[in-house]
Amino acid sequence: MTGRPPSNPSSPTLPLLFFILLLLLHLPPSAWEVFPSARADCECGYLAPSAAANGFRPALFTDLLETDFTRLARTAADNDDDDEEGDGDDDDIWTSGTTGWARQAFNMSRARARGEYGEMFAVGNVGVGEAGLGLVVRSEVVDGMVSVAELDTERLDLRWGTFRAMMKVSRVRGTCAAFFWYFNDTQEIDMEFLSKDFNAANGSYPVNLVLQSREAALAGYDAAKTGNFVRVELPFDPRAGFHEYRIDYLPGQVFFYADGEALAGMDGPAVPSSPGHLILQHWSNGNPRWSGGPPVEDAALVVRYVKAYFNSSLGQRQRDWESRCRDPAAPNAVCEIPDVTPGDMGAADWFFSDHSNMTNNQTTTTTSEESEGSRLKQPWWPTTGCLLLAEKKSNAWIAICSEHPTYPSTKMIRTETQPPQISRLKKVRKWERNNSTS
Ligand SMILES: *[C@@H]1O[C@H](CO)[C@@H](O)[C@H](O)[C@H]1NC(C)=O
Ligand SMILES: *[C@@H]1O[C@H](CO)[C@@H](O)[C@H](O)[C@H]1NC(C)=O
Ligand SMILES: *[C@@H]1O[C@H](CO)[C@@H](O)[C@H](O)[C@H]1NC(C)=O
Ligand SMILES: *[C@@H]1O[C@H](CO)[C@@H](O)[C@H](O)[C@H]1NC(C)=O
Ligand SMILES: *[C@@H]1O[C@H](CO)[C@@H](O)[C@H](O)[C@H]1NC(C)=O
Ligand SMILES: *[C@@H]1O[C@H](CO)[C@@H](O)[C@H](O)[C@H]1NC(C)=O
Ligand SMILES: *[C@@H]1O[C@H](CO)[C@@H](O)[C@H](O)[C@H]1NC(C)=O
């Protein structure tokens, strides 16, 4: 990143050294002061220093989306006067386009969901209350589908970022709670919690950390074996209280955290490189090998906040940063993101967006430019690993990878150079269609 073009070199009277100094300071011609000050705090962005503790450079991000869902509930309550139906319905806050989030509605048949049941993603299962956002999986099965919940960011242009969700998962067994970044089924970063796997008797509280990638599939179609699918024991019961789960998506590197403590890091070609969006999801399809369920009673995943500090893939947003940020080295031009830590959750209460001069044009919720980002409302499923199928067809190896252990067939991956490692394939099935999905 070079900041901005250097200042106009045509002035013959400018002493050379001074000019070089200007170049170093990245000053535009309009700001020929040696020590400029920031016009607004954080105008050059937000710094995540904790990656540095792991031996990496601190990462700077230009944009933010901070949502305190507990406050949305209060906003909804304050607006009760406007609630014409008088039912306390919080639809308004979602449809006003100001939250930056969109509730999802789509149905997945049993065949598509590959579980005992289909899944009905319904906006009625997404709501806010005093405790925060609730994503509910219903015990009642409707038309062969479990009624489940999903909320997505409207912005699709998140390319590199640190994404944090303060959540409490359900005690009710038989659901999958997920916080993830998504572009498509081969560019995805997941944290998934299976409520049936939590075991107080032996203190086992695993979280599944996954990178979905074409490369991982080609490397043997077993994300676990490539290091792109790990199951990590949390040092606490995630059902007993709120904890901050975090994904840092950096060029060539992904880190997962719980309460500011690193759980795992992944790198290599499996790391995505596209712009994408954030998804909160709570689902069940009755498949005993993954989500289990459906739950015997309604189960809620409660999310207190999501804080996302990120760079945008959009040229307009990058130009906005360039015109806003005069000098990253100026005092307060860059703000450090406070981290929660296991002993100190104080940072949970910090929102830059509470301070108007710390978020100067950095909280835009809509994107107008090129729709380069990932797609919303496309029926898809959280993916966790590859169960594979492969076949030699003419001169090319063709493998079909289900990107979810419980969903046996969906994607085709082709390699012309070498056969997939069939020894690792868990399943072989004939590829019947003749069209590629990619
Ligand atoms: C931002 O606002 C605070 C008060 O809310 C003030 O103390 C601070 O100086 C302001 N910073 C800038 C750069 O204007
Ligand atoms: C984000 O964008 C800024 C401005 O272009 C850049 O300085 C920074 O390095 C980028 N962050 C990452 C993680 O690439
Ligand atoms: C999903 O299925 C339910 C029950 O059959 C139906 O009422 C609803 O309209 C469907 N939703 C969508 C988005 O198709
Ligand atoms: C995901 O996007 C990448 C980049 O555009 C593409 O190469 C890949 O084929 C896509 N994967 C799927 C499953 O569509
Ligand atoms: C805890 O017990 C469960 C059920 O017996 C078992 O599946 C799991 O592997 C155990 N976990 C640990 C960390 O011992
Ligand atoms: C603020 O951001 C929007 C959206 O990117 C952009 O259109 C607008 O020009 C920006 N305003 C300023 C003052 O930079
Ligand atoms: C291949 O696709 C074409 C067009 O979709 C279809 O007409 C044809 O029957 C397919 N062939 C096989 C062997 O499936």
Image (cartoon, rainbow, N blue to C red):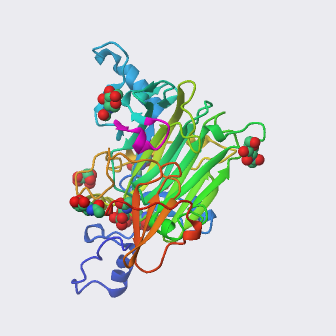
Q: Residue at x 28, y 32 (%)?
A: 96
In the rendered image, is residue 337 in sight? no
Q: Residue at x 57, y 54 (%)?
A: 209
Residue furthest top in the image: 86
Quadrant where the N terminus is found in the figure? bottom left
Quadrant where the C terminus is found in the figure? bottom left
> Which of the 4 image quarters holds residue 11?
bottom left
Q: Is residue 123 magenta?
A: no
Q: Residue at x 43, y 39 (%)?
A: 67
Q: Nearer the viewer, residue 330 or 156?
A: 156
Magenta-drawn segment:
105-118
Asked if residue 366 lies left or right of residue 384, the reply is left
Residue furthest right in the image: 202
In the rendered image, is residue 379 in sight? yes
Q: Nearer the viewer, residue 391 or 251?
A: 391
The answer to whether residue 119 is above or below residue 215 is above
The answer to whether residue 207 is above or below residue 434 is above
The answer to whether residue 378 is above or below residue 314 is above
User: Residue 172: x and y, percent?
Assistant: 60, 30
Q: Residue at x 45, y 49 (%)?
A: 308
Q: Nearer the viewer, residue 163 or 404?
A: 404
User: Residue 16: x and y, percent?
Assistant: 33, 87
Q: Quadrant of ligand 5?
A: top right
Q: Is residue 112 magenta?
A: yes
Numbered label tally = 0
The answer to whether residue 237 is above or below residue 262 is above
User: Residue 177: x and y, percent?
Assistant: 53, 40
User: Residue 90: x and y, percent?
Assistant: 36, 24
Q: Nearer the viewer, residue 155 or 45?
A: 155
